[in-house]
Image: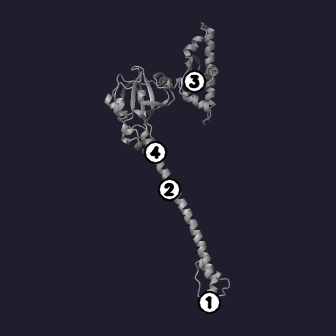
Amino acid sequence: MYNLNLYLCPSAAGIIEAVAKDFFDIDVTMDILSMNKEEERTGKKEHVVFLVVQKSHSQMGRAKPNRLKGNQDIQRDQEALEAAFLRMKEKYLSVSVCPVKKSHWEVVRSIVMFGKGHLVNTFVPVYPERLWIEQKTFCNAFPFHIVFDESLRVKQAGVNIQKYVPGLQNQKTRLDEYFSIIHPQVTFDIFSICKFINSQFVLKVRRERMPEAWKSQPALKLRGQMIWMESARCVIYLCSPKLRSLRELEAHRMHLSDIAPHDTTRDLILLNQQRLAEIELSNQLERKKEELRVLSQHLAIEKKKTETLLYAMLPEHVANQLKEGKKVAAGKAFPPLHGCPWARVAVCLRG
């Protein structure tokens, strides 16, 4: 645990023990193994290492005093067992047919506690005696992976990462010469990597190590998981390119086929590309909507001009009938056009 206040560590241990007892009915002990001040890229931090040990039922049983039981004790235990059985029977009969809504912590506890023991202890995986996969098949199946030892010397790498970082083909290459750690912000050594082994690591290719023809393109970023292999004393970095769209894929001069079919980065790129296409379509619809709004305003202005001209040329009752789409019969005489400017034109023509 990293903490800025060193005096909060004992209280953290007490809180963990209380939560384990109250929520999961588990007795644990939490001891402080070491307390160090470490210099990280973000500054000095207090690094506290705890040891959490769960007390087994056998240990709890040995803690109780052991004594010989007589006949009366055996009979008393049998009566207590029968009474407990009757209470369980009454509780079972009183249970409603309708399901009862459980609280949040009861649901969590029912998930963690499975059967007689913990859910973790109910499953035991089976491992093969030997690994049934060839080196070539593994490097092709995981095209973006790197195996390096405690001194950061590269032992093997995937086929595609060798293509985009050619320096990894040399097994004497140090990993920190070609990559820098973006996340988490730690120093590039085996101790820091093992300390943050459960974190997601993002590595970035150093631009000065890229080929001359590729220095104009963005630096490649890898995102994946570090796994420590105790037998080989090495770390395997299972990763994939950190890409989000086809445009970024093209900028790195990569193809979709370079990414393994089982890698979800493919789906992420295609899904994001579909989202970008939908956003572009939405923007086009907004632009068309704005153009229609402007055109509608222009049509309203032209309509107003047409109505003004119509009322200026014809009598009001005739113009109203024409606006309503009705037919107007031709008449021999019209009312005097005193207010119409065309009346003066007609008088001048008659004169």
- Tell me the residue that label 4 is attached to: 271
Front: mark 1 or 4:
1
CA separation in Å, label 1 and label 4 = 77 Å
Q: Are marks 4 and 3 in contact (CB under 8 Å)?
A: no
Which is more toward the observer, 217 or 49? Answer: 217
Contact between marks 3 and 1 (CB within 8 A): the answer is no
Point out residue 127 in the picture as x, y percentages from the top left corner.
39, 24
Looking at the rendered image, the disc whose residue lies closer to the viewer, 3 or 1, is 1
Q: Residues within 10 Å of mark 3 (few under 14, many from 20)?
A: few
SS category of the residue bearing label 4: helix
Q: Residues within 10 Å of mark 2 (few under 14, many from 20)?
A: few
Left/right of residue 312 with respect to residue 209 in the rendered view:
right
| Sooner in the amino-acid sequence: mark 2 or mark 4 | 4
Which residue lies under the disc numbered 2? Answer: 284
Q: Position of residue 147 (x, y in %)?
A: 39, 26
Q: Residue at x 52, y 59 (%)?
A: 288
Q: Which residue is mark 1?
A: 348
What residue is pinned by disc 3? 44
Instruction: Decide if residue 234 is on the left or right side of residue 90.
Output: left
Q: CA distance from mark 2 to mark 4?
A: 20 Å
Nearest to the observer: residue 126 or residue 282? 282
Amino acid at pointer 2: Gln
Tag nearer the camera, 2 or 4:
2
